[in-house]
Amino acid sequence: MNLLKVMIKAFLCMAIAFPVLVQAHTALKESTPGDGATISTIPSNLDLVFNAEVQLVKLELMGVGHEMPTNFEPAGEVASIYKVETPGMHPGEFTVNWAAIGSDGHTVTNSFSFVVDPAAASD
């Protein structure tokens, strides 16, 4: 009888925990420029596409040793697609650091990098 109680308790714990385990966290589905891309044309904006609606709370465009200007301002709105203007871009290596809060309340941070090289083959 004790074994049956233990098995029932274990089953109930798994039944409660399973939905939490399968919840997907926020992820960047795609970006333009893409992660690892080398592009020949200087982009006028960054496009970030998430797998669900998120609140984008941080976006930094980093050149080598310095932060580049963007029009990003954290706001309370949620969206799955963000377009961020990048005035003053120039050729070079860049990393985009971002943080977003998903519908589950978790903050996810990540980054992607790209190179702007006018001598590169056409985008």
Image (spheres, grey):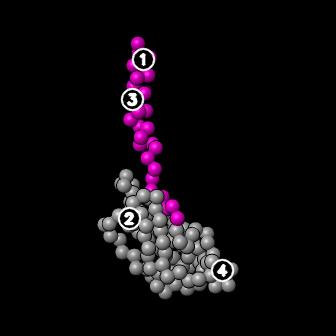
Q: Magenta span has 14?
A: yes
Q: Please state the extent of the stretch shown in magenta in the rendering.
A: 1-30
Q: Position of residue 58 (x, y in %)?
A: 41, 69
| Secondary structure at numbered mark 4 | loop
- Depth-wise, is mark 1 or mark 4 nearer the camera? 4
* Of the image marks 1 and 3, the number of the one nearer the N terminus: 1
* Of the image marks 3 and 2, the number of the one nearer the N terminus: 3
Residue where numbered disc 1 is placed:
4
Considering only vertical position in the picture, is 80 above or below 103? below
Q: Position of residue 35 (x, y in %)?
A: 58, 68
Spatial separation of the CA atoms under disc 3 and disc 2 = 36 Å
Q: Residues within 10 Å of mark 4 (few under 14, many from 20)?
A: few
Residue where numbered disc 3 is placed:
12
Q: Give the residue displayed 48% in from the left and 72% down from the top.
A: 47
In the drawing, what numbered circle is on residue 79? 2
In the drawing, what numbered circle is on residue 103? none
Residue where numbered disc 4 is placed:
122
- Contact flag, marks 3 and 2 (Cβ < 8 Å): no
Spatial separation of the CA atoms under disc 4 and disc 2 = 31 Å
